[in-house]
Image (cartoon, helix red, strand yellow):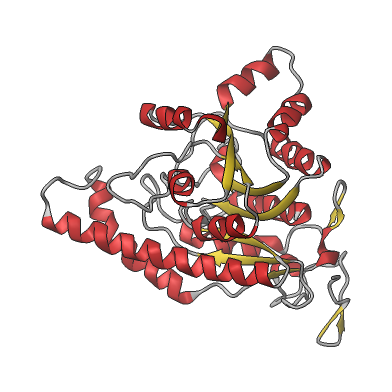
């Protein structure tokens, strides 16, 4: 299923600059000839420190034109075809509305017990989250039904829930590789059930078909989240950033760590990359930056180890990219996205 070499009669040169108005990564691909379908979700209602991830899909799309298409490890990724659906204005509008309702609650550090106004805000934000979940589930299910791989481009980390659900239904026994600074195992955060800090709690308690989550880069979490992780038993493996960094600083090999991490995953894998997993110098505007984290090279090696293991990536997402004027965030996000497309 290769990309067409021409778009509207104009020759496509993968070595040339992206043309204005071209698709993601400057490609001329339509949906029909694309193996990967990217689903932009510009939603950011519950980010608790710094908002702005709703601008992530648009910023990544713009930055993607700067990505050279030949990859030294993955080759001509573009030949399989990558198509990005239009950024949905209705979801962007929903995000603005939900954020306006959530902001006073977030500013107070959470909902007040017995407050009717806070209860009303929580209910409105929950309805918005459910709408996003159904939207993403529908788009991911459509891509899977067509034999394509869905990739979600966020938005806050709550948004890929529907895609994970769709992939788990299609591929029972699914494993999740979560690259993240946070566990995201809170039952709710600041009162929001569909919080960016609750995505993995919701997945592991609501989505049947997920056999295991393997978390990498974790360095910021609550004690209750640790207890929840332990309660999952064999369904959860956590590779803490401090442990991994200690191994590397003591002479350990990152390649060996990658093999251990990948070895904990089943044959079919969904990959979720929260950009805050990386060293914050690579994503300075992300909503919840945390010192430490993976280098870009370490993330690449981990993802390439997953590919080299023969495991099948059936869906993926990149989330929490927040654009900033003159910043590197979207540029890094676009390159992570292209690597994930290569895996898929």
- Image quarter where the C terminus lies is bottom right
The one of 150 and 302 positioned closer to us in this rendering: 150
The one of 43 and 209 positioned closer to us in this rendering: 209
* Residue under the image location 54 percent in, 70 percent down: 138
* Residue under the image location 36 percent in, 30 percent down: 224
For residue 63, above or below residue 115: below
Residue at the far bottom in the pictured view:
9
Residue 122 position in % (x across, y down): 25, 57
For residue 337, above or below residue 179: below
The one of 270 and 267 positioned closer to us in this rendering: 267
* Residue under the image location 69 percent in, 55 percent down: 314
Count the marks.
Answer: 0
**Residue 274 visible here:** no
**Residue 249 visible here:** yes
Residue 291 position in % (x across, y down): 52, 30
* Residue under the image location 72 percent in, 51 percent down: 313
For residue 228, above or below residue 249: below
The one of 280 and 216 positioned closer to us in this rendering: 216
Residue 317 left/right relative to 199:
right
Residue 253, quarter of picture: top right
- Image quarter where the N terminus lies is bottom right
Residue 60, quarter of picture: bottom right
Residue 195 position in % (x across, y down): 38, 50
Residue 52 left/right relative to 214:
left
Residue 22 position in % (x across, y down): 72, 75
């Amino acid at each position: 299923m290769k990309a067409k070499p021409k778009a509207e009669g104009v020759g496509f040169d993968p070595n040339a600059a992206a043309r204005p108005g071209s698709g993601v990564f400057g490609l001329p691909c339509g949906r029909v000839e694309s193996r990967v379908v990217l689903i932009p979700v510009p939603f950011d209602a519950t980010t608790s420190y710094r908002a702005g991830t709703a601008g992530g899909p648009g910023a990544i799309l713009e930055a993607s034109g700067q990505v050279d298409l030949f990859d030294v490890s993955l080759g001509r990724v573009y030949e399989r075809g990558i198509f990005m659906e239009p950024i949905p204005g209705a979801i962007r509008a929903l995000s603005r509305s939900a954020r306006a309702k959530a902001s006073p609650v977030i500013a107070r550090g959470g909902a007040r017990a017995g407050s009717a106004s806070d209860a009303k805000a929580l209910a409105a934000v929950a309805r918005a989250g459910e709408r996003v979940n159904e939207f993403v589930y529908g788009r991911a299910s459509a891509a899977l039904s067509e034999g394509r791989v869905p990739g979600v481009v966020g938005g806050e980390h709550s948004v890929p829930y529907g895609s994970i659900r769709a992939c788990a239904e299609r591929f029972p026994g699914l494993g999740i590789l979560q690259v993240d600074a946070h566990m995201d195992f809170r039952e709710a955060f600041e009162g929001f059930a569909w919080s960016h800090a609750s995505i993995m709690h919701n997945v592991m308690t609501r989505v049947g078909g997920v056999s295991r989550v393997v978390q990498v880069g974790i360095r910021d979490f609550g004690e209750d989240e640790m207890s929840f992780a332990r309660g999952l038993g064999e369904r959860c493996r956590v590779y803490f950033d401090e442990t991994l960094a200690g191994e590397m600083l003591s002479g350990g090999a990152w390649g060996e760590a990658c093999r251990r991490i990948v070895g904990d995953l089943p044959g079919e894998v969904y990959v979720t990359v929260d950009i805050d997993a990386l060293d914050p110098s690579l994503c300075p505007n992300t909503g919840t930056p945390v010192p430490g984290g993976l280098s870009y090279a370490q993330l690449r090696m981990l993802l390439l180890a997953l590919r080299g293991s023969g495991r099948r990536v059936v869906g993926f997402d990149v989330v929490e990219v927040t654009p900033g004027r003159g910043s590197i965030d979207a540029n890094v996000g676009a390159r992570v996205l292209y690597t994930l497309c290569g895996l898929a």
